[in-house]
Image (cartoon, rainbow, N blue to C red):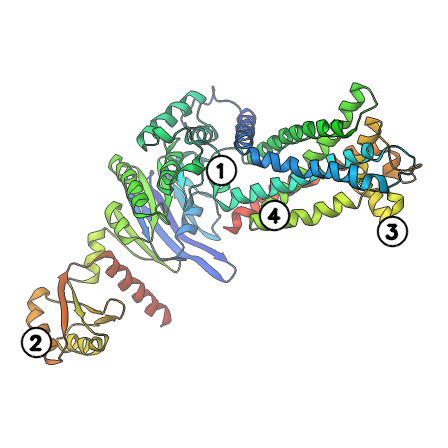
Amino acid sequence: MAMTDPGAAPSNLALALRDCAVMTKRGLLRMGRVPDELAYNLAQPIIFVLLFSYVFGGAIPLPGGGPFTEYVVVAVFAHTLAFMGVGTGTSLAVDMSRGVIDRFRALPMAHVAVLIGRANAELVRAVLVTGVLAVVGLLVGWRSHTGLLSTAAGLGVLLLFAYAMTWVGIAIGLSVRSPEVAGTAGLLWVLPLGFVSNGFVPISSMPGWLQTVAAWNPVSAVVTAARSLFGNPLGMAAPDRLPLEHPIAAAVIWSLAVVAVFVPLSLLAFRRSARRG
Amino acid sequence: MNGGIQAEGLVKQYGSVRALDGLDLHAPEGQVLGLLGPNGAGKSTLVRILATLLRPDSGHARVCGFDVVREAQAVRRVVGLAGQYAAVDEYLTARENLNIFGLLARMGPAAARARGEELIERFDLTRAADRPVRTYSGGMRRRLDLGVALMAHPRVLFLDEPTTGLDPRGRAEVWRALGDLVKEGTTALVTTQYLEEADQFADLIVVIDHGREIATGKPSELKDQVGGDHLDVAVRYATDLAPALAALAAAGLPEPQADEDTLSVTAVLPGGAGRMADVIRELDACGVEVADLTVRRPTLDDVFFALTRKADEHGHD
C-alpha cells in the first residue's frame, strides 16, 4: 500500500472525498440496521403534531388569523430536526467510549471524514424524517399553499437548519465524557431553543424581554421562513423585529453561521479528545 | 532495526499522574513483545502513543523507522491496532466492518473485498459473516477486531489486552488466532495482565510498573532473575502460618512469604531440592501440620511479584 506508484496514486483530496463517501455509507448502513431509532425519531413529532393541533389548537388564537394546525406543524418540523442533533451527539459519544473513534484515528484516513460522513448520513435521516412528517402533517390538515419551487425552498431552509444542528450535536458529543452526558447536555440547549421561539405560540403572548429573545432565536427565523414559503399563517399581525421582517435571509444566515462556528469547534474537539487518552 | 519499535525516554503526564515516566523500549522486527504490567502501569498509554493516538510530553518513539509524532501518517500506514474493546461497529456485519476499515486504510475496493474474505475464513467467521456484530459472542468480536487490525497487512501490530474480559473459551479462541500470527513472524506488541499469556506467546517480555520498564528479557531469563526453584508449603490451619514462616527462616531460606488465602508459605529454595531435609526437620520441630509440600520452577507470577516489590521498595528509599 505504501508502495503504490506515486504517479498513479489518486490525489489527497480524492482520497479524502472517498473517505467521506465510505463514512457516509457506514452511517447509512447503520441507519438501516436500527429502524427503531428512526421510529423513535418519528414518534415524538407525530405525538407533538397531534397534541398541538387537537389539544392546544383551539385554545391559542393566532394574531393575523389562520388555522393553528397549519401554524404549528412547521414548528414540529424544526423542533424535531433540532432534536436529531442531540441523537447525533449521543451516538458519536458512544463511538468514542467504545474505541471506534480511536480506530479511525489510527488509520491513514482523512480524519475529518469521520465527522463529515456522520453529518452527511444525518442529513439523509433528516430528509426521511421530514418526508414522513410532511405526510403526517397532510393527514391532520397542513397544506402548502404556494408553488412547487417555494415549497421546495421551505423544505430546503428546514434541512439546512437540520444540518447546522447536526454539527452542534457533533461538537457536544465529542466534548463530553459519556453518552449520557451528551444526551442531557443536548436537551439543555434544545428545549429552550425549541420553545422560546414563535414555533408553538405567538411571540406576542410572551413577556416583553422574552419577546426579544424569541425574535432573535434562530428557530423563530427558520420557522417563520418556512411558514412564509409554504404560505402558512405566521402568527403575528406585522413583524416588527429585524430577523422576522426578513425571515428567509435570517434563517439562512443563522444556519450558515452555526455551521461556520461548529465545524471548526467539532474538529478542535475531535483533536482534543485524543489527548484526553 | 528498521522494522521494529524503538522508544526512548517516553513521558506522559495526566494531571498529577505520571502514566509514563521515562520509558525505554526496543522491539526487534519479527518478534512478539509481551508488555506486562498491572492496571495503571502505563501499558495502554504506551500503545496509544505508539499508535499515534497520543503525543508524548517528552521522549521519542519510532515504528518501522517512522517517528510517531512527526511522521504519524506514515506510521498509520504500517500499523494495525486492536484495543481493549472490540472497536467494531455493532450494527454492521463482519463483512461490512472489514470492508469499511479496509477502504479507510486506503486499500482498493477489490483488494479490500478479497482480504476481507480471507480474514473471515481465517478467523472462522464464515457462518456469521453476514450477521450484525451485536449478535456475536465476546470471542467472535475480538476475532473480528483482530481481523480488522490485520486488514491492510500491517508490518507492526499493537494488541492492547486482547483477551481482557473474555471467558475462558473466548480467550482460547483469541489465543489460537494470536498463535498463528506469531508463527508468521509478525512484529507485535501485546499488552497483558495475564502472565501465562505473555509466557506462551512472547519472544521477549518487558515488565513495566509506574510508567517505567523494570525488567526485560526472554521468559526463561526473567524466571532465572528470581533465582532458582520455589518451595510451597501448604498448611491445614491459619494458625500454622506463623510457625511455618519461622521454620523456613530457621532452615535458612531467604524472605519466606505467607499467603492467608491459600494457607501456604512460599520461599525461594537456594541450592534446590538438596535443602529439603533441613526444611522438613525445621517444620517438624516447629510442630507445623503440613498439608502439601511442592518444589517448582518459578512462574512469571513469581517474577512479576518479585520485580514489582523490588521496584516499590526502591521507590520508597
Residue A217's x, y, as percent? 80, 43
Report the front residue among B157 and B135.
B135
Q: Is residue B286 above or below residue B187?
A: below
Camera-nearest label, 1 or 4: 4
**Badge 3 or badge 1: first in the primary sequence:** 1
What kind of residue is marked 4? Answer: Ala
State the mark number for residue B281. Answer: 2
Label 1 in the same subunit as label 4: yes
Q: Is residue B230 visible?
A: yes
Give the Cα separation between the discs numbered 1 and 2.
64 Å
Image quadrant assignment for residue B245: bottom left
Give the Cα separation between the discs numbered 2 and 3.
94 Å
Q: Which residue is mark 1?
A: A104
Give the chain letter at badge 1. Answer: A
What kind of residue is marked 3? Answer: Trp
> Residue at the spot x=13%, y=63% of the render?
B295
Q: Which residue is mark 4?
A: A182
What kind of residue is marked 1? Answer: Phe
Q: Which residue is mark 3?
A: A209
Residue A165's x, y, as percent? 69, 38
**Badge 3 or badge 4: first in the primary sequence:** 4
**Badge 1 or badge 4: first in the primary sequence:** 1
